[in-house]
Amino acid sequence: MSETLSPIDTAKFVAAKRAVEFVEDGMKLGLGTGSTAAWMVRCLAERVRDEGLKIVGVPTSTRTAELARSLGIKVISLDEAKWLDLTIDGADEFDAELNLIKGGGGALLQEKIVATASDQMIVITDAAKEVEHLGAFPLPIEVIPFGWQTTKALVEETLGSMDVLGQSSTLRMNGDVPFITDEGNHIVDLHLQRIGNARQLALVLNQVPGVVENGLFIDICDKVIIGHGDGRVQTKDIITGEDSERMIEFAESDNIFADL
Ligand SMILES: O=C(CO)[C@H](O)[C@H](O)COP(=O)(O)O
């Protein structure tokens, strides 16, 4: 399908391209974070530039805000927008109920706030992220720096009574120093292997003092768009029951590839 894009980038691109077809004039949009979401921002910018589409975006990270602004998308804060029509974001894992693990890029807190403040959330992804049970991907939790080691120990103790296989956790690092989120917090990654009851775990984790938020997105995502390396996209919608597939045609002479 693509001469220069790798199969994984083709998969991310076609999922993003399909997702922005759901964007309508005048919409207030949540803009996700990560490499797949970056494709979505580029595809959206193309529609703004070529069709004169009028939208505003609420980014979920400083990275996404910078990319969106640089491509001519008007960026506003969530408090200015108050409520959003649609959020489009990536994910690290999704299951058959479209429950997610997010936060691989460390933006889970803003991502969850923004997605929850939206009428609809569409997740764009490649097929490798579909799982039967969430948990193979380390589950990120955002913790405040004060007493983080105590928080981490309390979380591990809590996991001992939960329906999960693993109970170890690691502080996420950025080279030699702890990773710092846009909110000035740390990320602790939980190595659980398999989560038996994601809904219960999401609630219990947020009860531990020092935990700000966890990367389990339960009942937040409505639709998932799965891209493939040959240009196919599958759309699964939990509300309408849609499960469809089609090809996305694109030419690498498109404006969008000049931005890379
Ligand atoms: O949750 C996220 C960032 O916090 C990302 O959406 C998630 O990590 C997927 O990223 P990518 O599209 O680069 O695989």
Image (cartoon, rainbow, N blue to C red):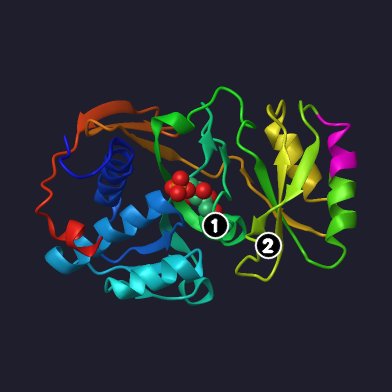
Q: Residue drawn at (70%, 36%), measured in percent from left and top?
A: 199
The answer to whether the residue bearing label 1 lies less than 8 angstroms from the nearest atom of ligand 1 is yes
For residue 259, side relative to residue 105 (left or right): left
Residue nearest the viewer, comparing 83 with 21: 21
Splitting the image into 4 quarters, where does residue 163 fall?
top right
Which residue is disc 2 drawn over?
A: 176
Query: Callout 2: few (<14), some (14-19), or many (20+) C-alpha neighbours within 10 Å?
Result: few
Magenta residues? 156-162
Q: Quadrant of the N terminus?
A: top left
User: Dot 2 lies on which element?
Assistant: loop
Q: Position of residue 193 (x, y in %)?
A: 68, 29
Q: Residue drawn at (58%, 50%), measured in percent from left and top?
A: 103
Q: Position of residue 33 (x, y in %)?
A: 46, 57
Splitting the image into 4 quarters, where does residue 105 fall?
bottom right
Q: Nearer the viewer, mark 1 or mark 2?
A: 2
User: Dot 1 lies on which element?
Assistant: helix
For residue 173, side relative to residue 2 (left or right): right
Q: Residue drawn at (13%, 64%), measured in percent from left and top?
A: 51
91 w.r.t. 50: above or below: above
Tell me whether circle 1 and circle 2 mark residues in contact (CB < 8 Å).
no
Name the amino acid, label 1: Glu
98 w.r.t. 46: above or below: above
Residue 239 seen in render: yes
Splitting the image into 4 quarters, where does residue 113 fall?
bottom right
Q: Residue drawn at (20%, 62%), measured in percent from left and top?
A: 46
Q: Position of residue 253 (x, y in %)?
A: 9, 53
The answer to whether the residue bearing label 2 lies less than 8 angstroms from the nearest atom of ligand 1 is no
Q: Any mark on residue 111, and which?
A: 1
Q: Position of residue 126 (x, y in %)?
A: 39, 36
